[in-house]
Image: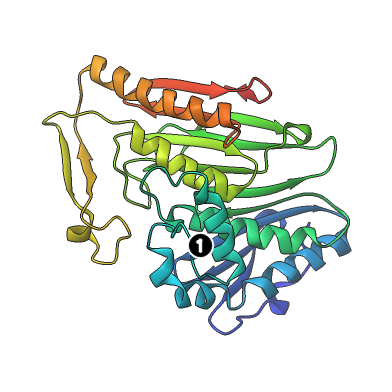
């Protein structure tokens, strides 16, 4: 549990640094909003939070300095990126270069992974996590479990089930994407939650699987991404603006397409599992080692 008093907390060059209930830590700068938790020796938890805060300083400015490259698809000869978070983003998307994707598809997960890495350099933690708007990187000592809430709609982000992940499952990241999420989607999924070896890998996979949950129908409204955000890395690709009520058979076909895409990812080792939801229908792709609790 975090023992530092509120008086000891401080703002660091624009970074908001504050305690939360339950011994958690809140870090915020611009669009990056992190909720961090840790368990273990009191001194280790204190040191891990300090390490997270130190690493957070300057992280956003480093990303902004390379944003013009991060918004482009990967160069086959290698993008000239130097920041550690940018490099995590590139590693996460490189295996998906057969489809259109930019490193920005992994940004939230890569930030979570980077902060967690700083924390776990401190010995003595039994469990730790960094939650970046629902994209979560976590650390588990042997014998520990990590429970996450499964959501059916990214708009409400209200968990309607729990997924319990054991330390020996090899999963250290989870991410959720959908048509009403923080980022644009090409598909119609209400929510796609992905489990992977790290948060950056889960982040890009959730984006691509959510894109694959798709169909055509007059109830689906789309617009060029640049019309909605002139800085979007999706350029003039049509992104989903709204999804009305669809025929059940079209929803099933869209989910089947997304599940087939997720299954190929799982078979290749890119992800460990995925849960896809759209208008009351569900598909699950898993290797059987993750327990779902309703």
Instruction: Name the spot of residue 97 as percent of width and height, x first.
Output: 44, 47
Instruction: Name the spot of residue 46 as percent of width and height, x first.
Output: 80, 66
- The C terminus sits in image quarter: top right
Tell me: 94 left or right of 18.
Answer: left
Furthest-bottom residue in this view: 13
Instruction: Name the spot of residue 99 as percent of width and height, x first.
Output: 38, 43
Give the residue drawn at x 18%, y 29%: 216
Judge by depth and name the residue closer to the eye, 49 or 212.
Answer: 212
Judge by depth and name the residue closer to the eye, 73 or 277.
Answer: 73
Q: Is residue 20 visible?
A: no
Among the 4 quarters of the image, the one containing residue 47: bottom right
Instruction: Name the spot of residue 140 as percent of width and height, x first.
Output: 77, 44
Q: Which residue is mark 1?
A: 78
Tell me: 39 left or right of 243.
Answer: right
Tell me: 222 left or right of 79.
Answer: left
Give the residue drawn at x 45%, y 74%: 64
**216 relative to 78, above or below:** above
Q: Is residue 211 visible?
A: yes
Give the residue drawn at x 36%, y 52%: 183
Among the 4 quarters of the image, the one containing residue 52: bottom right
- The N terminus sits in image quarter: bottom right
Name the secondary structure under disc 1: loop
Judge by depth and name the residue closer to the eye, 193 or 86.
Answer: 86
């Amino acid at each position: 549990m975090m023992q530092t008093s509120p008086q000891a907390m401080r703002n660091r060059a624009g970074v908001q640094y504050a305690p939360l209930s339950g011994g958690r830590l809140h870090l915020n700068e611009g669009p990056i909003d992190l909720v961090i938790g840790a368990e273990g020796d009191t001194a280790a938890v204190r040191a891990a939070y300090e390490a997270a805060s130190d690493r957070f300083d300057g992280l956003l400015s480093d990303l902004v300095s390379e944003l013009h490259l991060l918004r482009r698809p990967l160069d086959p000869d290698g993008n000239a990126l130097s920041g550690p978070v940018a490099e995590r983003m590139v590693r996460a998307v490189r295996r998906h270069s057969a489809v259109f994707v930019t490193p920005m598809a992994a940004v939230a997960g890569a930030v979570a992974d980077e902060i967690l890495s700083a924390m776990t350099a401190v010995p003595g933690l039994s469990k730790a996590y960094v939650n970046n708007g629902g994209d979560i990187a976590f650390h588990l000592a042997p014998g520990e479990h990590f429970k996450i809430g499964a959501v059916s709609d990214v708009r409400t982000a209200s968990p309607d089930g729990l997924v319990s992940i054991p330390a020996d499952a090899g999963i250290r990241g989870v991410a959720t994407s959908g048509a009403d999420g923080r980022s644009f989607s090409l598909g119609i999924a209400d929510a796609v939650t992905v489990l992977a070896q790290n948060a950056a890998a889960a982040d890009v996979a959730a984006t691509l699987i959510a894109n694959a949950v798709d169909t055509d129908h007059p109830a689906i409204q789309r617009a060029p991404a640049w019309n909605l955000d002139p800085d979007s890395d999706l350029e003039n690709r049509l992104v989903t603006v709204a999804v009305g009520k669809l025929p059940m058979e079209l929803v099933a076909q869209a989910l089947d397409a997304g599940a087939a895409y997720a299954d190929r990812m799982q078979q290749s080792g890119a992800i460990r599992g995925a849960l896809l939801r759209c208008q009351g229908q569900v598909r699950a792709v898993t290797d059987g080692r993750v327990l779902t609790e309703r």
